[in-house]
Image: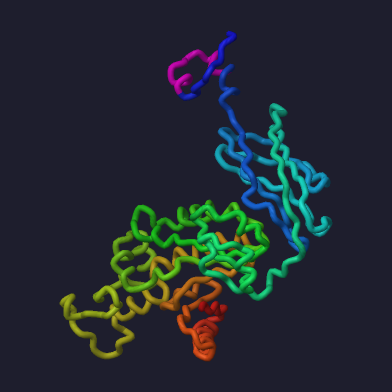
Amino acid sequence: EGHPVTLNCREFFRFTLLTAVWTSVLPLCASVQVDDPPYSVFFRNQQDAALRVRITSDRAFGGMVSGQVGGRDVAARPVEIAAGETWVKLPFDPSLLRAGTYPWKLSLAETATGERTEKSGDLRVLPRLDPDAFKIMSWGGWTGMPPDYLKSLGINMVNLLVSRKSPREVIESGMFVNFRVENSKAARAASTYDLAAIKADARRLLKPYEGLHTWRTTLVNSEVYGGAWVGVATNLPSWRVWARRDLGFEPVFPVRNPPLEIDYKARGLPQPKGVLGDDPALKSVVWFERRGMPPYLVNAATREVVRKLSPGNIVWSEPPYGGVFDNLDAGVSWIYDYPLSVCISNFRRLFARVRPIGKLAYPTL
């Protein structure tokens, strides 16, 4: 008594067996933390706008969340806080506010104890932004190019690698955002090729940006496709189970890798005769390029997460390869030419590549 005390909960509980002491000290070790929102910029024509914050707690409990935005009360509503992370939101209507900066406050009250945790800050409301506006994106946006400089060039969208800490000043600049997700490596080892886990990881990366009005497109797994995936895929037990079910027989890959060139002689297999379409090796290779490449499945799983967090989001990849676009919304290829006439010719070629399968074309200079 009368002296400062440092309490290490882990060591204390490790060596303390007295129930009475445990009960009296436990509340001192409990913690609820409310993080700053990952973004705080909104637009006057934004639908279902809400300030989102992450709450971290060492225990689960029921509570009530309420608050204010721009001096307007947000009605209290019940919320269940999990042990770990829980996202809560303060919904509001930006159309009721003029463009400007406004204070906000969030209050979380625990039902059982009445204990209250609060967080406050400022948010910005910007003029209307048409989500369907034509977009011109800077591929190099994640390197920290100043948004004002990009805008001066007529660029209105930036490309941000979501696995890095996305620059807040870019996200809140009023420019459109394309998030880039590179998660194909999860398909390179049997221990990680779990689509449920891949979805969970994608959701962890993208959840902070749920409801972001400017997030309209998502690039998944750029330049990762090709014949080298044959050797990876055939070593994944879960992939082989799916392949047998989807293909109808055990896949056969007597190929040079890469490219996907069938080499019967090197594998000691007889040359096929008759209708080549009946040959299991050819069927396997064609199926692999159209449907079976592991990144295609990763892309499909990631798109499912994206579309739940950002309805209507356009998920795309590049370059054109086999069935890479079939599970996505758009496709693209690069154009490294300078004369405008050549660029337009290549744009048309790309358009002809993706439109017959009902996808959008994303030409890239």
Q: Is residue 25 left or right of residue 185?
A: right
Percent x, y of residue 24 = 59, 17
> In this view of the protein, can residue 78 be seen by the observer?
no
Percent x, y of residue 123 = 72, 50
Percent x, y of residue 287 = 38, 76
The residue located at (73%, 54%) in the rendering is 124
Q: Is residue 191 above or below residue 84?
A: below
Dominant secondary structure of the residues highlighted in magenta in the image: helix
Q: Is residue 18 magenta?
A: yes
> In this view of the protein, can residue 50 be seen by the observer?
yes
Percent x, y of residue 189 = 34, 57
The residue located at (60%, 23%) in the rendering is 27
The N terminus appears in which quarter of the rendering? top right
Residue in front for this viewpoint, 15 or 134:
134
- Asked which colour scheme the image uses, the reply is rainbow
The residue located at (33%, 76%) in the rendering is 284
Residue in front for this viewpoint, 147 or 91:
147
Q: Which residues fall within the magenta stretch?
A: 11-23
Q: Is residue 119 magenta?
A: no
Q: Is residue 54 above or below residue 164?
A: above
Q: Is residue 209 left or right of residue 296?
A: right
Residue in front for this viewpoint, 155 or 132:
155
